[in-house]
Amino acid sequence: MTRYVIIGGSAGAVGAVEAIREVDPIGDIIVISDEPKPAYSRPMIADYLSGEASLEKMFFPTKDFWDKNKVQMRLWKKVVKLDLPQKTVELENAEKINFDKLLIATGGKPFIPKMEGTTRKGVYNFTTIVDTQRIEEALNKAQKAIVIGGGLIGVSAAEALAKRGLKVTIVELKDCILNLILDKEAAKIVETVMQKNGLSVITGRTVQRILGRKDNDEAVGAVVLDNGTVIECDMVVVAVGVIPRTELAAQTDLKVNRGILVDRFMQTNVPNVYACGDVAEAYDFIHETNRVLALWPLARIGGRVAGYNMAGQKCEYPGGTAMSTLNYFGVPIISVGLTTLDEAEGYETLTFHDQEAGVYRKIVLKDGTIVGMTLVRDIESAGIIFNLMKNKVNVEGFKHKLIADNFSLASLPETLRKQLLLGI
Amino acid sequence: MRRICANEQLCMGCGLCEVYCTVWHSKSRDFIKAFRREHPKPISRVRLVQEKPVSFAVQCRHCNDPPCVFACLTGAMHIDEGTGLVMHDDEKCIGCLTCIMVCPFGAIKIDPYRHKVVAKCDLCQGLDVPACVANCPNEALTLEEV
């Protein structure tokens, strides 16, 4: 009987467990997680904080998933050491667990920039339910929050805090928020929506220091920007990015670049050892090379691929790419691939922008195939474009339809349509 | 498993598929009440797509390896253990739109009348033949065993 050990109990583990169980109904599966709770939807923590989702709703994918799949859960346990030649993992209490197949799905952790004051009371991260609960406890006394970092996590935290009645200011180092995901046009739309809903956005600035309160130096009282501006606040959320939790790989033969390197089967350079999710550096189908992509859907899909292969059924990872959906204050946005290259050499950009309606569509092409898409407000056909992109379909003949108002399956050439709908 | 197939040669673009779908997915299942009085307004889960002269209806294909299920951030989109159909749990949905990003058919909709939730075809649970298929006047929609 095969013994599968999975380190990390989130999206990657879920994917792996469901795949392993499809192939191997009886093998031992042990999931070791350093969180006190079984998997919950991490992207939902913003909805939880805003009051739009209950804890009960957050179990991922369902509360009974682990029991149903006969998984031994070792919660609130930290793996401190891997002995790959001996095929064991060691827990904090020196307990050793043997494995036949190992999946490292430890995820990412927030990056804390070096700055004065990050240890003060009232400084939070925003990646786990524990972070959210700590913020929740402080909410009734807080009035003004500063969010450092205008990426996905920062803006999500900012939206949730604003919905809870706080006066929120986002401080972003680059010249627009969400700059890794959106081009300037789309980012501007989000910024405007944020401002309409009472948030302030400061770009091109960074927080240099977090000051204490006059009556209590240990608690957050204000931040100082790099231009000397002082902004009073009683809460700071640090959201400048996440980095892969690769510490366990340090004293092993595992190849680590930014993340743990895996092949198209999610296997590391060490046989029987796999990695997926935010800790892994896996294939990106647009860049056609390995990249760290800290995205929930890719963690689960990568986990599935790892799971199949661990259980002995060959399965190739189709690859992921930067792909995000945003829905801040009810403005739907989908952005995939290379969206921030404007007229860079060799790329062609098609855009449609109705400023009044706030509708924006942009497609980036290279050699006749789609390499990037951004859709704002009018997004229901995004998946059709996403799949043309993923399958590297040459769209030269109908590219202008991609940004048309009524783009749908009916806009595709007959042969493509039939292939999709009838599988011929 | 069953799947709805559209014959674009036979589709007249009348939109009755959307009308009957809306009514079946309403609370009252009554035409007048569904379209005039219900709040939140019910919406159609089938989408009539047109680029003249082409028109046909698109519903969830209930894929064998459904990308929407594996991309879902919350577990709302799931495979029903009994039927194998791709089902959507409104209660769990937070309207994150990830399913819409990956559906190759553009078969998932944002429900504009409810807060942060998507909607899609469930093959009309409770009916032998889905409402769109049963009421297509030119038999452009058929239910096939796949």
Image: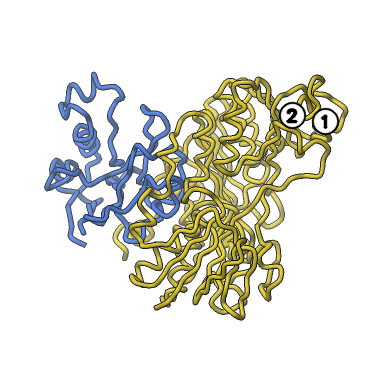
Chain colours: A yellow, B blue
The answer to whether residue A401 is seen in the rendering is no
**Callout 1 amino acid:** Leu
The answer to whether residue A230 is seen in the rendering is yes
Residue at (42% x, 76% y) in the render? A2
Kind of element beneath mark 2: strand
Q: In terms of sequence position, does the residue under pointer 1 or pointer 2 come before the other? A: 2
**Callout 2 amino acid:** Ile
Classify mark 1: residues with Cα within 10 Å, few (<14), some (14-19) or many (20+).
some
In this rendering, position of residue B11 left or right of residue A269: left
Q: Position of residue A224 (x, y in %)?
A: 83, 29
- Would you place residue A234 above or below residue A84 in this image? above
Q: Position of residue A412 (x, y in %)?
A: 40, 52
Residue at (65% x, 32% y) in the render? A188
Q: Position of residue B73 (x, y in %)?
A: 46, 47
Can you identify the residue that label 2 sits on?
A202
Can you identify the residue that label 1 sits on?
A225
Residue at (50% x, 68% y) in the render? A5
Q: Quadrant of residue A292?
A: bottom right
